[in-house]
Image: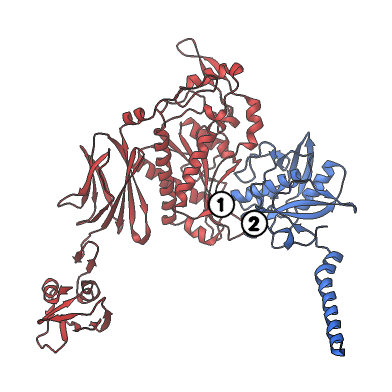
Amino acid sequence: MVAVSQLAASFDLTIADTPQPGRLTLMRGDRIIVLTANEGLVSVAGQLVALPSPPLERDGEWYVPIDFIGSAVALVHDEPVELRRRSGLVLLGAVRVPQIVARYQRSGRQSRLRLMVTPATEYVIEQDANRLVITLDADALDLELRDVRPDPLVSGIQGVDGSPALAIDLRENFGSFAATTEPALGGAVEIVIDLQPRPAEVTRAGPPRTPSPGSGPGPNATPGAVAVAGETGADAGLPVLSELAPRRAIRAIAIDAGHGGDDIGTRGPEGSLEKDVTLAVAQRLRNRIESELGLRVVLTRTGDSTVSLDERAAIANNDRADLFISLHANASVRETATGAEVFYLSLAEYGDEARDAGFTGQLVPTVGGGTRVLDIVPWEMAQLRHADQSARWAETVADELSLRVPMSPRGLQQAPFRVLVGANMPAVVLEMGFISNPDQEAQLTSTTFQSSIVSGLLRSIIRYRDEIASEGTPVAPRDAVPPDATGRSR
Amino acid sequence: MTRQHWLYGGLGAVALVGIWVLFVGLPRWYPPAGTETTAAPPTAATPGDDGLVNATLFYISDDGMRLVGFERPLARDADTAAQARIILEAQLTEPPTPLLSPIPLGTELRAFYMAGQDAFVDLSAEVTLGHSGGSLEELFTVYAIVNALTTNIPAINAVQILVNGNEVDTLVGHVDLQHPLERNLQWVADPNTAPSPDDQTDPL
């Protein structure tokens, strides 16, 4: 309970001079509050307001529950009045004090700080020596820290005095960070900051694997070793195609906006075109990847142009993308069909061709004299080498999306999709939803839904990148000659 | 036994006969044109003694998310290619409600031929021009044709779809049609969720 005389002084309320037994009148201008002792209902500017407990009168002083501020005083005050019970803050006037609930998680060698900011507020993150400082566009912060404990990367997290900022004190093991922003319920936004150890830490932690004789190269093998393995394949047996994919760090992402130009894709009942939705999401995703992850982005089309399916994969190959995602919107003759679906290439349709084709390296002359072995990849075989990683990448995408958008009953599937066949990197097709469903058409064209899709994809890229980085030392760019669009292989 | 008892017994017998006629007799005398089946028909079309064969065709389920197998009696032909044409022509026709065809109506079979165990199905341009354009729908279109042939005719192992006599990359931008495709029941309703045989009329 709080004394009414204190509230009157703080909120410029006038206590009426003509006291009546068991009744108190407060005034602010022509707005009146009438309290009755031991009555839970209060008259506020002509309205009845219920309090969680009735006012009390003791020795001439009146006491009211703290909620009286938000439910009664706020109604008679000229300026906004907000009571925050959790933090004990009372905000008077148009001040910007976002609530921030900070949760800190440790997973493997990486750490993650999640900041739920209500309402959504712009922010910047700066690294200052051994501190990361997150500064919000606000007058002050209403900060709550949960589960925050020191760990090998972080020695402490606290608010910054005199500034609407939060500081993360870093240890020597800290290497890099990546931040993403995701819309949340109630006008809030969640800032997710992933903290990584130094690369040297990763290398030490991931012991190199030794390839077993005749089994093809291990994860740490160089591309040259891939080709040598091919030369000895007659004695040792052909390596499994999926083991031949060179393991690399994730530096570039290929985003394929499905359809385009003359090919509109499918059309929603309100006339929305698949090709427009896919391009809009592709551009949003590119912006977020470049600004928040600092990775290179390859777009297979940047405008309303016609691009063949094989050409899309060829663009990704030629620009040495490390991951490929093709964006689409689904359609059904049934309006009720709904939900997102993630596809990776099914192998059954290509199994015989893969066995028949074999996989051998070829000696080619080099500019400086001599020869080197290159693995020549037939177009139809390009994706097969990445089958395992595509499955893993697809699973990660489906997993992250399922937290943000409705999924179809079959959220993760395999299918013989042409656009995936020639991609020489882990590749998936994402059907973001059914544009033939009126509700989903509205979602697919909305900023909120597109942002949710983009956030899910961004998170899946981070997860996938971090997982493969923690499993072994990345290998330098591939020597395998990627297929191109014209010759299918070169 | 009183006269009243005889009266009640007679009425009961008449009622039983009526029930038998309604639920057993009529379905036998006037069989339906087809029967929805469970998902994974593992065997070839079943020949009958009347020059007909029970073939499984594939249509879109009422929720739009699956294909369902549907048995229809079709003319029997000893020639594999001729039998395949009969099955394809039936697959291209409209199914009974509430099922929907996964193949755009108006699509015609232009040609059919075989090379070894691979079948080649040449369809008219309506298969792409009348298509909704969704990838799931395209999977349904392709695998309704592939499964209808490979499920019912053991001599056919894989099917390649052509459009207007030409090889195509895809129908509407998704499913790879550059080579013959084998039977794939991934999108066919799970037998556990499909109507049970008890719910269906007697097979022919």
- As measured in the structure, the alpha-carbon distance from the residue carrying label 2 to the one carrying label 1 is 23 Å
Q: Please identify the quarter of the rendering in which residue A230 is found.
A: top right
Going by the picture, which residue comes out furthest to the right?
Answer: B50
- Give the camera-side residue of A410 and B114: A410
Q: Name the amino acid type tagged 2.
A: Thr
Q: Name the amino acid type tagged 1.
A: Asn
Rendering colour (chain B)? blue
- Relative side of A106 to A390, left or right: left
Q: Please identify the quarter of the rendering in which residue A68 is found.
A: bottom left
Quarter the N terminus of chain A occupies: bottom left
| Residue B186 in picture, x, y percent from top left | 64, 46
- Relative side of A76 to B74, left or right: left
Q: Which chain is red?
A: A
Position above or below: A160 against B115: below
Q: Residue at x 86, y 42 (%)?
A: B79
State the mark number for residue A330.
1
- Relative side of A308 to A112, left or right: right
| Residue A183 in picture, x, y percent from top left | 37, 55
Position above or below: A197 against A181: above
Q: Residue at x 24, y 65 (%)?
A: A85
Residue on which the image places disc 2? B193
Position above or below: A276 against A472: below
